[in-house]
Amino acid sequence: MAFDESGQVKVDSTLHTVNVSTLPYIPYVNGHGEANGRTQIMNVPAVVSIQQNLKVPNLKRDIVEGLSSEPKFLPGVLLWDTCGLKLFDKITQSPDYYPNDSEIDILSLHANDIVENIVHGSVVVELGKSNLRKTTILLKAIARQKKHVSYYALDLSKSELDQSLLHLARALGSSPYIRCCGLLGSYDDAALWIQKNLGIASKPLFYLWMGNSIANHPPQEAISLLTRLGNVSVSSRSPRPSFIIAVDGYRDVHAIDRAYNIKEGHSRNFILNGLKHVNALAKQEVFREGDWCFKGMYDEAGRCYRSFYVAQRDVVVPFAGKTFHVAQGEAVHAINSWKWDVEQVKLICGDAGLKCSKTWLHSRLGYGVYLLEPQ
């Protein structure tokens, strides 16, 4: 994600439209590929900026708001810059991080059944860069069923989109069934862009929301996001979109603690990178890494794992013309990960005007993949 000097995301003021029928097919390998032992020229998947001037996130404003609050917090989006995404990938590779392996187990076992619900000619929008192995499993299953689908990967980092699309293309090979494009923007950007693209909003639309990402949001915020993304039809006759989401419902406290506080230090590095992001915005070291440590805890009553930056001494933080004081031992909230079981998922999607049509659960770990359809 790129920022201007005011801390706002740099945007393209033009609302882009994309003709789905002209999107390149997916078999792209950095301009060249191998097919039957022969090298052939291939197209590189495009990344389209859909960022809007309206409601542009102003991180400096949000940081000031968070540091002025009691208890203090920093915006979760700070964690998901290019460096943060790479650090999170290291977390997902740890054997202790059960959400990743649980989801892959479900997809490997049920991919054909899951994508059976995605009809020929659909548009599939993935909300946030997923683990490539997960996306590949689903797209290969679609290709095996010989259904033509236009796949869009949505993310806030162009470099990560470029890399992900390239690796995905290599994994899928020369399938003629999947068309691919990257979308640079936020969830709200995607909803507005889809609404204004008649060639997309009028087609069957499926959102992929994997990796328990929906449960980084409080239930009411998740309901609001599902509602906004679900209300993108261009007319009363247009189909409303469906969702395929992955949600962690595991309740083993010890396993959760191991997963979110990886012993190799990956969790610490991922969370504390958020402070480096603030430093980059401020163009100076307002947060010294040595002054802070990572702390995480599972709230059994709230069914939520909460991660914090904790001051190791009294700290003064100068930022955006203001000065903030953080006492030794004071915790500044970084991010949450809720654990929702099947009944909670049904309640949340019901409040968003959706019904839980199908559920694929892990045999042991309470992790689930859900098909949500309009009521």
Image (spheres, grey):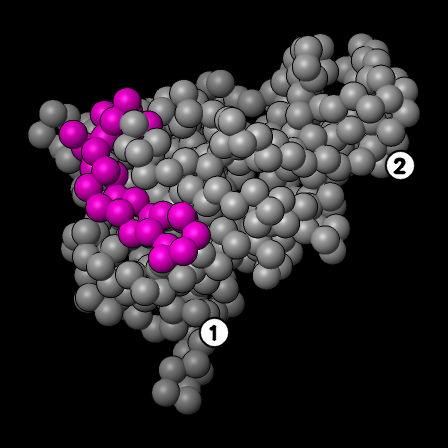
User: Is 75 part of what is drawn in magenta?
Assistant: no
Residue 232 figure quarter: top left
Q: How many marks?
A: 2
**Does dot 1 land on a helix, a strand or a loop?**
strand
Image quarter hosting the N terminus: top right
Residue type at tag 2: Gly
Residue 342 is labelled as: none
Disc 1 designates what residue?
A: 32
What amino acid is found at the position of numbered circle 1 in the picture? His
Of residues 323 and 373, the one drawn nearer to the viewer in this rendering = 373
Viewer-proximal residue among 300 and 102: 300
User: Residue at left 65%, top 30%?
Assistant: 334
Q: Is residue 150 above or below residue 305?
A: below
Magenta range is: 348-375
Question: What percent of the width, then of the height, locates residue 134?
Answer: 42, 58
Tell me, yes or no, if residue 206 can be seen here. no
The C terminus lies in which quarter of the figure?
top left
Expressed as whole percent of the image width and height from the top left, the position of residue 147 reads 19, 61
How many angstroms separate mark 1 from mark 2 (CA)?
Answer: 46 Å
Q: Confirm whether residue 219 shows in the render.
A: yes
Could you say which disc has been placed on residue 290 in the image? 2
Is residue 152 shown left or right of residue 66? left
Determine if the magenta segment contains residue 361. yes
Mark 2 Cα-neighbour bin, 10 Å: few <14, some 14–19, many ≥20: few
Image location of residue 81, percent across then percent down: 63, 40
255 vs 273: above or below? below
